[in-house]
Image (tube, rainbow, N blue to C red):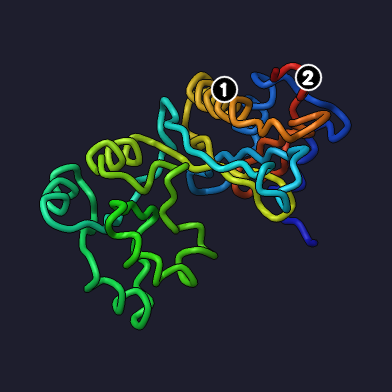
């Protein structure tokens, strides 16, 4: 893969054989995020899980203390009083069955997170083939299937992120922007790591977190010293 000059220059500042302490890694990632836009800082956590087994799956959500730096559009599927509650909480879109053809036929996907009350999951389930592959399907473990619509919307707007294993048993999540202070990124990172440590499936034997890499959207990754994360 051909890399641009900016990426190559940034990579020179990182020792690929080293494993950095969290503070040093965050400092390096901020320094190498040299794009003309405010890059997202991402964490990539390779686990010792085998996601093919249900008892080794990881899926959850956590509210980052300083948010993600991104404004998130929330769609809520609800009916009755819950429609008013969702609107009052600040949901960007609220509706029910009438939204199905808009998403299925018109390809409307102008939202980042979908919340649904349990009594609407029969309706939302019809969108599984569209929402599922995009990671947008509401899920009780992520707190997005709930009757407490106000809390769900407020937490998402405040910086709640969802984490889950991909097919290669790696978790990829944003923890903020390059414009965040090192302290803000460190707080968000530690909150995420604590949540994932607590989510360790009991069926996983041996090393749970095998590697952690921090990287800006357009820049090289920085490996962390996993032994110091526990």
In this picture, residue 146 sits left or right of residue 208: left
Give the mark nearer the N terminus: 1 vs 2: 1
186 is higher (above) or lower (below) than 107: above
Q: Quadrant of residue 154?
A: top left
Looking at the picture, tell me which residue is in the foreground, 97 or 44.
97
- Which numbered dot is residue 190? 1
Q: Is residue 116 above or below residue 205?
A: below
Q: Would residue 34 be visible to someone looking at this image?
A: no
39 or 93, nearer to the observer: 93
Mark 2 Cα shell of 10 Å, populated few (<14), some (14-19), many (≥20)? few
Q: Is residue 150 left or right of residue 137?
A: left
Mark 1 to mark 2: distance in Å?
A: 14 Å
- Name the disc covering residue 27, or none: none
Residue 188 location (% of width, % of height): 51, 27
- The residue that disc 2 covers is 227
Residue lying farthest to the bottom in this orientation: 105
Residue at the location (49% across, 36% down)? 176
Q: Tell me the quadrant of the picture where the C terminus can be found.
A: top right
């Amino acid at each position: 893969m051909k890399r641009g000059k900016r990426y190559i220059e940034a990579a020179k500042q990182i020792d690929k054989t080293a494993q950095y302490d969290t503070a040093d890694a965050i400092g390096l990632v901020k320094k190498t995020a040299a794009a003309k836009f405010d890059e997202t800082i991402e964490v990539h956590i390779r686990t010792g899980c085998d996601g093919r087994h249900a008892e080794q799956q990881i899926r959850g959500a956590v509210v980052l203390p300083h948010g993600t730096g991104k404004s998130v559009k929330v769609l809520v599927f609800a009916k009755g009083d819950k429609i008013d509650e969702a609107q009052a909480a600040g949901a960007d879109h609220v509706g029910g069955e009438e939204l199905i053809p808009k998403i299925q036929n018109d390809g409307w996907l102008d939202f980042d997170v979908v919340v649904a009350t349990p009594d609407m999951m029969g309706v939302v389930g019809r969108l599984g083939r569209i929402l599922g592959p995009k990671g947008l399907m509401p899920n009780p473990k992520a707190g997005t299937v709930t009757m407490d619509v106000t809390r769900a919307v407020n937490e998402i707007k405040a910086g709640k992120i969802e984490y889950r294993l991909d097919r290669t048993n790696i978790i990829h999540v944003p923890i903020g922007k390059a414009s965040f202070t090192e302290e803000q990124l460190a707080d968000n990172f530690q909150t995420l790591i604590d949540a994932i440590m607590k989510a360790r499936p009991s069926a996983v034997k041996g090393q749970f977190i095998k590697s952690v890499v921090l990287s800006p959207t357009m820049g090289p990754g920085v490996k962390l010293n996993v032994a110091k994360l526990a």
